Image (cartoon, rainbow, N blue to C red):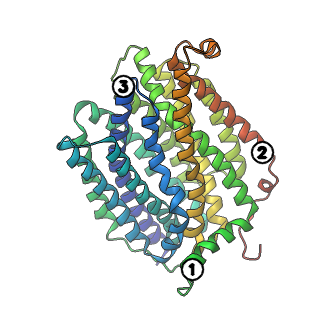
Amino acid sequence: MNNKKLFHRFMLINFSQSISLIGSGLTDFALFYYILQGAMESNGQISQYTILYFFMYLPGIIVAPFIGALVDRMNKKYILIASDTAAVVGSLSILLLYINNSLSIYYIYFVVLIKALASAFQTPSFQASISVLVEQNDYGKAIGLAQVGESMNKIVTPLLGGILYYYTSLEAIIVIDFVCYLIALAFIIPCKLNEQKNVIIQESMHFLRECQLGFQILIKDKMLISLLVLFVFHNFLVSFIEILVQPLVYVMNEQGGMIVSNSLALGGVMACGGIGMLISSIILGINGGPKNRIATILILNGCGGLILMMVILVKSVVLFAAGTLLYFLTIPFIFGSNITIWQERVPVEHQGKVFSIRRACVLGIIPISSLLAGWIVDRMKNHYESSSILKMAMESSNEVYSLLFFIIGLVTVFVSMIFAFNRYFKSDFIYREDT
């Protein structure tokens, strides 16, 4: 089959997963805002909200290293379908409990955990399918196009989610999630993946031996190890941002007079981030991104830190949204450059194993960061009245979010500067079996 037809199949699969992400994302937005609203209005502990992030990323620690071997053995299309199905079943179960007034925060934690487990299968399967359907010199473009779908999700999900949450109900949002699932299913079922393209899998190889092989391939490449460590730091800091930005916008909107509802303000800010991602994803999809990928990652990561430091100085939701757009302009280039490096350096037949290990490492730090962020915020707010230092730095206990936001931006800049001196980043060669 020619490359044009294979790329067409990739586009159909990419579209199906984008639609599925939008539906699932609407439910996620509604659930997260449902809990955030309860915590903020009751002046409760923000850690109750951050626990959601803990369960969202927990499977990345436990099962992701072993999923890769299954991804390399199984049909990736079936894995994608099963993952989408598990996510929508979880959403529908929440709908039933909510209608019967039996929904508890603990069951929401459970469903978020199930959906995270489905995502742990979905992401490496989708990334590995890119290598099956796309030629190596088109990896950058394919990843850019894949991120276009993810960016559209980040625009549509919070904006539409904020509107729907304000004007309709949680039930309506979950029904839309189910409709998106059916549309995605209609597009992905007819697609076939050429699973054996340049891939020879030793069927007799023991499952645990395959998992071990993934670690061995990764350990050989010092550049990938350095890149992995960098993104562990990156995700640790980004997780703090993700935790802080939603209550920060909530507080900022109320202090600004609440021109719009909190759900619409939050949805608008998050949608601006999606617009930034969409713009740069389209650019990445057209030209494949910069050739010097390491420099791109370090420079744009540092620029992102500077943006965080500057944007928090404003007290306007509108200006904060503009800064959010600028920050997310950098994300597709950073992650696109990172994934392209991994795809170029890891043999196709082992990418499922290695990518799952990478995912486990970079996502494994997020639950720790999320719980730590919630604990720090609650502790600083509780000690505000008795601390002269905190009172000098902040006008009120709500300024905790702004102060931590600035610190995260500063640390991000320092991390980029430190890794710029890493000697393994000075060479960028394709992975060879004899290295």
Residue toward you, 412 or 363:
363
Question: Residue 311, image x and y in percent?
Answer: 57, 25
The residue located at (22%, 46%) in the rendering is 97
In the image, residue 399 above or below residue 266: above
Q: Give the residue at mark 2.
A: 420
What label sits on residue 198 in the rendered view? Answer: 1
**Residue 300 quadrant:** top right
User: In this rendering, which labeled residue sits more in front, label 3 or label 1?
Assistant: 3
In the image, residue 351 above or below residue 196: above
**Residue 346 quadrant:** bottom right
User: In this rendering, which labeled residue sits more in front, label 1 or label 2?
Assistant: 2
Element type at mark 3: helix
Q: Earlier in the sequence, mark 3 or mark 2?
A: 3
Residue toward you, 76 or 61:
61
Q: Which kind of residue does numbered mark 3 sit on?
A: Asn
Q: Which kind of residue does numbered mark 1 sit on?
A: Asn
Residue toward you, 413 or 49:
49
Q: CA distance from mark 3 to mark 1?
A: 52 Å
What label sits on residue 411 in the rendered view? Answer: none
Residue toward you, 116 or 417:
116
Q: Give the residue at mark 3.
A: 262
Q: CA distance from mark 1 to mark 2?
A: 35 Å
Question: Residue 160, image x and y in percent?
Answer: 32, 38
Residue 325 visible in rendering:
no
In the image, residue 378 above or below residue 201: above
